[in-house]
């Protein structure tokens, strides 16, 4: 099996794990947990688990030249994306959020070109813009002709996530796939612990078990384990190309939202989701030069 195909397989596994993030987060915040606690507290839990993994496997400290990039990834994937996404889930359905986050592949492609030495072809860029245009069009239709406040938060989250994905995939080529996310969540602890401690007294510890189960999922799977496969996929298949797999997350998130939250999936949503997945299939055929 070629590395590109292996990368796509690992990318699909990572996307499958990430696809439950939006509905799980919505269950947590609607169930009474504070948005800051969910958005940043999940990384505190992930960091504690990651620290144990690093110690048990006796991982050496990354070279000093990589620490700046690890900190940048932490601000993108541990602080920016989770916090903005959690705020959005307070006001918009998870299924809707899954469509809006369909701009992630375009942002990831742009970040790959800027930071990772990848050179997508003009045809690849055209396909990426087409997919993003479909996503923004859907958001505006659902919002009655304009973007909702939750859409703005989701688009901001997409910018942070796409940039973090590209930087994470690039440094994973040197440090290793699972090692990168472990170091990223550990290095984020000094930044995320104070705000989590600040809101800790207001946490509803008596929330129902589905609420806490959802929180545990986003902490261990969305913030940690999912990146084991996702980073490996980007290392093997390239950041820009594997990044397009994120558009497949649409169907998975729609299914998870329907099952976990009982959200209705109307015909317009399915039409846009199908069109976007078609764009992924088309982008798979477009050339991307890698260093």
Image (cartoon, rainbow, N blue to C red):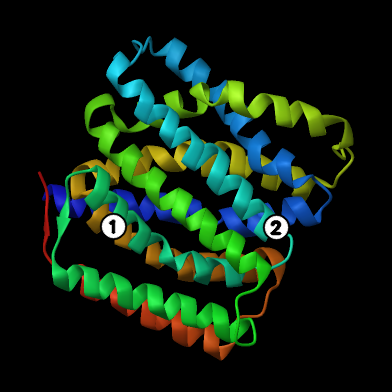
Residue at the far bottom in the pictured view: 267
The mark lying in front, picked from 1 and 2, is 1
Q: Position of residue 82 (x, y in %)?
A: 58, 46
Earlier along the polypeptide chain: callout 1 or callout 2? 2
Find out whether the residues at labels 1 and 2 contact each other: C-beta distance under 8 Å: no
The residue lying toward the viewer, choosing from 84 and 49, is 84
Residue at screen point 57% across, 61% down: 154
| Mark 1 surroundings: few (<14), some (14-19) or many (≥20) residues within 10 A | many
Residue at screen point 57% across, 86% down: 141
The answer for how far apart the CA atoms under marks 1 and 2 are is 28 Å
- 49 in relation to 254, above or below: above
Q: Position of residue 98 (x, y in %)?
A: 53, 66
Query: Left or right of 258: which side holds 197?
Result: right
Can the viewer see residue 113 in this picture?
yes
Can the viewer see residue 94 in this picture?
no
Return the residue at label 2: 26
| Mark 2 surroundings: few (<14), some (14-19) or many (≥20) residues within 10 A | many
SS category of the residue bearing label 2: helix
Q: Where is residue 274 in the image (x, y as percent from the top left)?
A: 40, 82
- 15 in relation to 221, above or below: below
SS category of the residue bearing label 1: helix
- 212 in relation to 92, above or below: above
Query: Left or right of 283: which side holds 18?
Result: right
- 127 in relation to 33, above or below: below
In the picture, the disc for residue 109 is: 1
């Amino acid at each position: 099996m070629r590395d590109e195909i292996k990368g796509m397989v690992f990318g699909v596994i990572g996307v499958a794990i990430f696809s439950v993030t939006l509905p799980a987060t919505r269950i947590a915040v609607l169930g009474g947990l504070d948005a800051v606690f969910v958005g940043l507290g999940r990384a505190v839990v992930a960091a504690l688990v990651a620290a144990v993994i690093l110690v048990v496997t006796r991982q050496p400290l990354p070279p000093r030249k990589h620490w700046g990039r690890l900190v940048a990834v932490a601000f993108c994937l541990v602080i920016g994306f989770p916090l903005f996404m959690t705020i959005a889930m307070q006001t918009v359905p998870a299924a809707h959020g899954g469509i809006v986050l369909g701009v992630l592949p375009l942002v990831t492609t742009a970040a790959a070109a800027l930071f990772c030495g990848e050179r997508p072809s003009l045809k690849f860029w055209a396909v990426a813009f087409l997919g993003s245009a479909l996503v923004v069009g859907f958001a505006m239709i659902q919002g009655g002709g304009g973007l909702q406040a939750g859409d703005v938060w989701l688009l901001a989250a997409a910018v942070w996530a796409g940039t973090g994905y590209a930087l994470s995939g690039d440094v994973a080529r040197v440090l290793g796939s699972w090692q990168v996310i472990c170091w990223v969540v550990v290095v984020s602890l000094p930044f995320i612990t104070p705000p989590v401690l600040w809101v800790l007294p207001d946490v509803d510890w008596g929330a129902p078990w589905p609420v806490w189960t959802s929180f545990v999922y986003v902490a261990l799977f969305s913030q940690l384990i999912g990146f084991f496969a996702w980073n490996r996929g980007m290392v093997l298949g390239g950041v820009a190309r594997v990044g397009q797999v994120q558009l497949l997350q649409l169907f998975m998130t729609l299914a998870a939202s329907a099952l976990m939250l009982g959200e209705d999936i109307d015909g317009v949503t399915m039409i846009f989701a199908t069109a976007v997945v078609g764009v992924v299939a088309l982008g798979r055929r477009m050339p991307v030069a890698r260093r």
